[in-house]
Image (cartoon, rainbow, N blue to C red):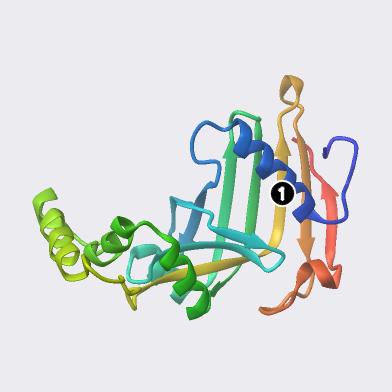
Amino acid sequence: MIRDNTPSDPYDIFDAWLKEAEEKEPNDPTAMSLSTVDETGMPSSRMVLLKDWDSQGFVFYTNYESRKGEQLIAHPKAALMFHWKSVRRSVRIEGLVEQVTSEEADEYFASRPKQSQIGAWASDQSRPLEGRFELEKRVAKYAAKYGLGKVPRPPHWSGFRVRPLRIEFWQDGPFRLHDRLVYSANDVKPGDDVKQSGQWNTERLFP
């Protein structure tokens, strides 16, 4: 798609590539690495799952009291990367971070399996754990508490949206002569719709 063409809308490329990955990638095609920084500028990366996306950005959910949650709230910039080995493609995204609305978080939390909802209450994510039994006790505690009714969303559990300032598409080429196509946004502020404003610049990079 990107070897001979430069589509005006990077989201069209992402949509096509994600759909192909969902057909051919055996496990977790929505898995993406998330990189954040702490107060010293030290980077940290981990894998999360993409739960929603549109021209406003890419959404994932987590415990706001976790290490990544605290870092994103303190330093609201992040980098994402999708690597689809089965189709030999990757996408890199860098951008600003916003918290999703309470309505968005409530809707997504309600769609999760009940055991996952209980797990969100039971896990003090990123905190020290003495042993597996401690976690299992907490799961049993909240399972008993919410076993017969609706599980409310924990106040510390919600989502983040990464609003891209830069999106790079990479696809494998013969003899390591890969294709790299970059979309960069100019003068974008939180709340702007990059797709509608037509502010994407494009360039190709040497592999």
Task: Determine whether 20 is above or below 121 in the image.
Answer: above
Q: Is residue 6 left or right of residue 91?
A: right
State the image coordinates of residue 22 (x, y, percent, origin top left): 60, 39
Residue 44's image quarter? bottom left
Residue 41 appears at what percent x and percent y?
46, 64
Residue, x 77% and y 75% (percent of image)? 187
Q: In the image as oriented, which residue stretches furthest toward the top?
A: 175
- Kindly identify the residue that appears in the image at 71 percent across and 59 percent down: 166
Q: Residue furthest front?
A: 148
Judging by the rendered image, the residue that carries numbered circle 1 is 14
Of 172 and 85, which appears nearest the observer?
85
Tell me the kind of residue under disc 1. Answer: Phe
In the picture, the quarter occupied by the C terminus is top right
Image: 136 above or below 179 = below
Residue 38 showing in the rendered view: no
Q: Secondary structure at mark 1?
A: helix
* Location of residue 49 in the rendering, given as x and y in whole percent from the top left corner: 49, 52
The residue located at (75%, 26%) in the rendering is 173
Residue 100 is at least partly visible in this image: yes
The residue positioned 45% from the left and 75% from the top of the image is 73
Left or right relative to 17: residue 121: left
Q: Position of residue 21 (x, y in %)?
A: 63, 37
Q: Nearer the viewer, residue 119 or 197?
A: 119
What is the tally of numbered marks visible in this picture?
A: 1
**Figure quadrant of the N terminus:** top right
**Residue 92 located left or right of residue 150:** right
Front residue of 187 and 5 = 5
Q: Quadrant of residue 144?
A: bottom left
Q: How many residues crowd around disc 1 within 10 Å: few (fewer than 14), some, or many (20 or more)?
A: some
